[in-house]
Structure formats: C-alpha cells, structure tokens
Image: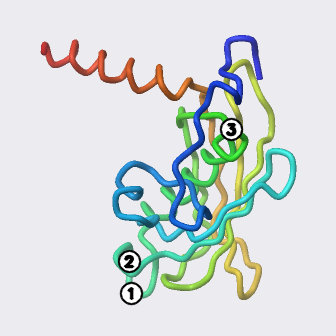
C-alpha cells in the first residue's frame, strides 16, 4: 500500500450475500445472490483467496460449456475481490484471460487468486479456474487493479457522467 492509497479503516465493509459467504455487486445484492454463481470466497493466506463457484446454465455458450464472457467475468470478480477481502477497494484497470479448456456449466469449480506484487497504487493479481473434480486448470488470468476510495470513487464517477452528458 502507498501513502496515497486508502487505508482499511477508510473502507466500509463490502456488502455480502445472505450468510456472508460472497461479496456482492449492487444488482446481486438486490437479488440476494451472486448471478455469476460464486458460492463462497475467503482469504486462504496473505493476499491469496479461494472462491467456490459453478457456472449457471443461463451463462451457457456452447452445449454444456460456459460462455467465455462468464469465464472472464468470474476471473475478474475473484481477482478484484482480493482487495475487498482485505478491507480495500480496487477497480479493474486491465485483465488478460487465457482460456485453456472448455469450462463445464453447473459443475463445482474453484478459483484461486493471489497478489503477485504492488506498483504504486496498483495491485497485480493472478488466478486460476480449476475443475474441482479433477484439479485440471481451465483458465488463467492476470490483471491490474487500481486502489480506490469507495466513497470518493463513485462520487467522482457521478460527477464525471453529469459533466459528460451536460446535465
């Protein structure tokens, strides 16, 4: 963490699903569950997390196979949640996904994510999506995540959008 980064004390607790097992985005919070199929997530070491999930049928691309957009979204969610689980907030600056094998829908999966390093206010994170029944790695991702103050970030967004649209 750098001097210009928010401290964990500044970051309010991230909203969680009923039961508290998954951090939820705004729409998933309204619906009461993660629409991407995340069922639990936790830190399993310093800046290392494990997420359990399954691709819901409504994200099926080919027959029995997850849409690549779902895979990228799930990777983004888990890599980005490393900071949230540590009491901080980041936003995705970039994400690269390597699709190694087709991801089956409605099968138990595990996504392990870790922070590789910090450069100024950026976390460089990586992760692997794994088929739980066999341990085979289905995809890998690397991303850059910028630390943000949760309150100021969204206020700045609203101000920018109002200016952009001439409101």
Residue 116 against residue 32 in the figure, above or below = above
User: SS at mark 1?
Assistant: loop
Of the pair 2 and 74, the residue shown nearer to us = 2
Neighbour tally class for label 1: few under 14, some 14-19, many 20 plus, Cα within 10 Å: few
Give the spatial CA distance, label 3 vs label 2. 33 Å
Residues at circles 2 and 1 in contact by the CB criterion of under 8 Å: yes
In the picture, the disc for residue 63 is 1
Earlier-in-chain disc, 3 versus 1? 1
Left or right: residue 134 versus residue 162 is: right
The image quadrant that residue 123 belongs to is top right
User: Which residue is drawn at the image coordinates 34% and 57% (left, top)?
Assistant: 30
In the picture, the disc for residue 60 is 2
User: Which residue is drawn at the image coordinates 13% and 13% (left, top)?
Assistant: 166
Q: Which residue is mark 3?
A: 87
Residues at circles 3 and 2 in contact by the CB criterion of under 8 Å: no
Left or right: residue 163 versus residue 4 is: left
Left or right: residue 16 versus residue 144 is: left
Q: Position of residue 96 (x, y in %)?
A: 58, 47
Q: Position of residue 120 (x, y in %)?
A: 73, 18
The image quadrant that residue 137 belongs to is bottom right
Q: Position of residue 147 (x, y in %)?
A: 62, 27
Give the spatial CA distance, label 2 vs label 1. 7 Å
Front disc: 2 or 1:
2
């Amino acid at each position: 963490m750098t001097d210009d980064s928010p401290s964990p004390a500044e970051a309010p607790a991230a909203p969680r699903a009923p039961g508290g097992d998954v951090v939820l985005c705004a729409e998933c919070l309204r619906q009461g569950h993660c629409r991407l199929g995340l069922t639990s997530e936790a830190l399993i070491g310093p800046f290392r997390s494990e997420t359990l999930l399954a691709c819901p049928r409504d994200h099926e691309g080919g027959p029995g196979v997850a849409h690549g957009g779902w895979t990228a979204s799930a990777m983004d969610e888990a890599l980005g949640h490393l900071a949230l689980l540590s009491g901080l907030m980041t936003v995705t600056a970039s994400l690269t996904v390597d699709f190694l094998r087709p991801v089956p829908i409605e099968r138990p999966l595990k996504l392990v994510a870790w922070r590789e390093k910090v450069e100024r206010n950026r976390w460089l994170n990586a992760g692997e999506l794994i088929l739980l029944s066999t341990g085979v790695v289905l995809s890998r991702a690397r991303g850059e995540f910028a630390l943000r103050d949760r309150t100021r970030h969204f206020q700045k967004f609203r101000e920018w959008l109002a200016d952009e649209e001439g409101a």
